[in-house]
Amino acid sequence: DQQVKQNSPSLSVQEGRISILNCDYTNSMFDYFLWYKKYPAEGPTFLISISSIKDKNEDGRFTVFLNKSAKHLSLHIVPSQPGDSAVYFCAAKASSGAGSYQLTFGKGTKLSVIP
Amino acid sequence: EPEVTQTPSHQVTQMGQEVILRCVPISNHLYFYWYRQILGQKVEFLVSFYNNEISEKSEIFDDQFSVERPDGSNFTLKIRSTKLEDSAMYFCASSESFSLWNQPQHFGDGTRLSIL
């Protein structure tokens, strides 16, 4: 049951360039989407989120884009820095109905930013 | 910055034994959660808790699991009779509000549970 899919297990990017991480979802009830970053031996750290009433949300170097018709979201990191090297998780949530308390996670994409 | 804290960081337990994992959520948060991540798999929701009762639970959260908020600061997950397949990283999370649905859940660093 893969309601949230991150099809790229890994991504390598040069320092200073743009990192684009992708996520697809299948559940039409999802209307709130989050990106988390995770370093080894630490818990997921909240990065940025977007609700379905928007198609873009920006916070510093991080921008999340949502394409509801394609059930696709992406996280852009510009410029990428070596400290951004981590596993990035996409997560989704419904705001009402069954399952509205829980986050559903993708498998994660390991980003490596090369100096 | 306020954070969710979890203890212990690593727990080793014999199969069949009871284990209690502890969490201190962020102080002004009202909603509390447990998730787990088996090695190599996704982070999976276990249970959410609000106002001293379970608000939602997954199929994983069977009768062997229970949660409690024994005082004003701690939130615990108990596994009564551990099985080998309970070996995983267990994450506690909290959020400020549910009614304001665009509130993120903030996670602790996890407890690695190893069942022997």
Image (tube, grey):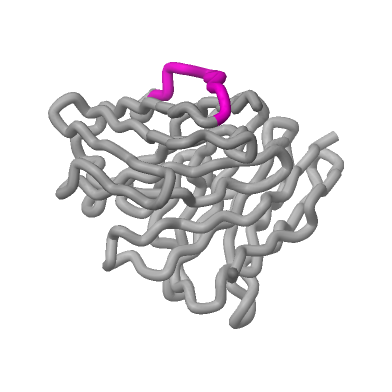
Residue A9 painted magenta: yes
Q: Nearer the viewer, residue B11 or A80?
A: A80
Residue A27 painted magenta: no
Q: Nearer the viewer, residue A40 or B95?
A: A40
Q: Please indicate, yes or no, whether residue B102 appears anywhere in the rendered image.
A: yes
Give percent across and percent down for residue A51: 24, 49
Taking B30 as reference, is B23 above or below it?
above
Which quadrant does the C terminus of chain A fall into?
top right
Residue at 24% in and 36% down = A66
Give percent across and percent down for residue B73: 62, 77
Residue at 46% in and 57% down = B105
Residue A67 falls left or right of residue B35 = left
Name which quarter of the figure residue B101 lies in.
Answer: bottom left
Bounds of the magenta segment: A5-15
Give percent across and percent down for residue B31: 44, 67
Name which quarter of the figure residue B107 lies in.
Answer: bottom right
Which quadrant does the N terminus of chain A fall into?
top left
Residue B94 falls left or right of residue B103 = right
